[in-house]
Every structure is written in C-alpha cells, then in structure tokens.
Image (spheres, helix red, strand yellow):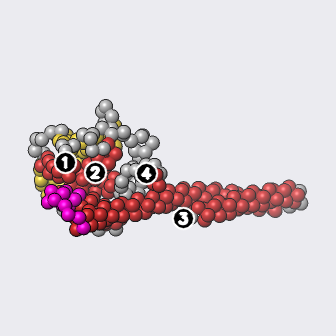
Amino acid sequence: MKRRTALIFYILSVYVFVQFIWWGYHLIELTEEVSHASEDVSKRVIMILGEGAVFLVLLVTGIWQIHRSIGKELKLSERQNNFLLSVTHELKTPLAANKLYLQTVTKRDLSKEQQNELIKKAIEENTRLERMIDNILNASRLENNALKLGKESFDLTLLMQNIASRFNTMLEKETVELENKEPISISADKFLIETILNNLVDNALKYAGNESPVVLYAIRTNGGISFGVKDNGPGISNDYKSEIFKKFFRIGNEEIRTQKGSGLGLFIVSQLVKMHGGTVECLDNQPKGTNFKITLRDD
C-alpha cells in the first residue's frame, strides 16, 4: 500500500470521527430543547444516542484494525523494496565477476595454474548465484505450500561433516567446524535439513567473517534433538530477534549495506523448521556472537 493512500485513509477517518462527534453534540442539544415538550421524543433520542455509541465503538475498532494492517503492509512493502535492491545487486555481482574471469582466461596468455584459479573463482561465484536462486524458489514454494516433507532416517552428524567440508573447501581454510562428532540419527527431510544448515552457515560467515570460527553442533535431548550454528560475530540486538525470521527483513539500510544477501535465508529456515514441527531460536553465543538453535521433537 502506498503511503499516500494510507494518508488519505487517515484523513477520512479523522473527518468521519469529528463529524460523528459534531452530530452527536447537536443531537444532544436538540434533545434538551424538545425534552420539555415530548417525553417520547426524548426517549427516541436516547435510543439513537445508544445505537450511535455502539456504532462509534465499532467504527473506532475497525479503524484501529485497518491502521494495524496498513502498518504491516507498509513494512512489508519496505522489505520488498529492500529485497529488490539487494537481489538486483546480488545477481549482477556474480554475473559480472564470471564474465571478467572468463574474458581474462580467453584473452590473456595465462599459465595453467592461473587459468585454474580463475575458473575456480568463477565456479564459486556460480555456486553463490545458485544458492540465492534456490532461496528465491524455496521462498516461493513455501508461500504456495508446494514444498512437501519426505522424511527419512539419516546421520545428522555426517551431514554436518559434509557441509563443513564443502564450505571449508570453498574458503580454503578450516573455518567451519563441528562441536561434537558422535553419530546422531534423525528422522526428517534430509534435503530440507541440509538447506537449513546451509543457510545458517552462510549467514554466520556473512556477518561474522571468514576468519571467525563457525561451529555446527547437535545434541540429543529428552524427547528430541537440538542442533544449530554458532558464531563469534557481532551478534544480533534483542530488538531485532523477533524480526529477523520475517520475509525480506534485513537489519540496516539496503542502499549503504555492505553484507551480501536477500533477506530470505532466515525466513526459509524458520518455515522449514515449522514444517518439521520444531522451533528455531536466536540466542546469544558466549562470549559473543549468535547461536541459532533448532529443536525437533521425536515423533
């Protein structure tokens, strides 16, 4: 909803409210004038005032509900605009980088090692582009209820090891690590759990940096399993912890932002966890950073 439309609605609401009070005032004044002449007229006016009071309460309640709806629509519109700005940048960056890498390979006389390095970087940019497109598609499927659970039993620890290995290979350093390596069996949709962990690790690396360790963990609890991703980054303010799982939400101003992203990763995480009947929490890590903890109950 456009801000101009919202402004017009509020002006009309105030006008109706003021006019209602003005009519009520004149009606009361008229009642006083005719009350001495006709008791029946006085009773009818009182009845009208009572019905008017009920109407006024309903009117105020309706305006308040519409006001809340307008606020939500304006916030969503702002997040959508931020999403378009970020996605436009995120799509152009890897495409431009890949074009430069390939042009360099084809137009310059490079050694085999230099060619392989540029090709490797192009593959990394392509992987990042694929991950972002997957997030957009997954968000669309979630909105349309097109994603279905396909539960199976698998080793969660082994899945985490594979994810850590893949990210470390891409980063060329041992940044992502496991807190415990004991096998933990879980019954869930393996692909969706992998998507959850990929988004959380990617988010941790994005905000904590490649030099700060990112820890994957999983523990069996009474009646279920808790797992997640911890980092030693700047952390997330309590003011935003209830907002970060909303679609398109990103902290800060999109036009001056330096971190990459689309505002879909944590939204997808929260929705996929809900599909499994679980919960996701954003906790403070110790001594600093963020801990995204997911809890799934045994069926």
Badge 4 marks a residue whose secondary structure is loop
Kind of element beneath mark 2 = helix
Residue sitting at x 82%, y 59%? 26
The quadrant in which residue 117 appears is bottom left
Residues in magenta, as a range: 107-121
Q: CA gap, disc 3 to disc 1? A: 46 Å
- Residue under the point 85% across and 59% down: 30
Q: Would residue 178 be visible to someone looking at this image?
A: yes
Q: Which residue is mark 3?
A: 1
Closer mark to the observer between disc 3 and disc 1: 1
Q: Label 2 sits on what residue type? A: Asp
Instruction: Locate residue 32: give its quadrant.
Output: bottom right
Residue 181 position within the rendered picture, expressed as x and y whole percent measured from the top left:
12, 41
In this orientation, which residue lies closer to the viewer: 24 or 103?
103
Counting from the top left corner in percent of width and height, residue 109 is at 20, 63
For label 3, the SS is loop
Q: Amino acid at mark 3?
A: Met
The answer to whether mark 4 and mark 1 are in CB contact below 8 A is no
Residue drawn at x 16%, y 59% is 111
Q: Which residue is mark 1?
A: 172
Sooner in the amino-acid sequence: mark 4 or mark 1 = 1
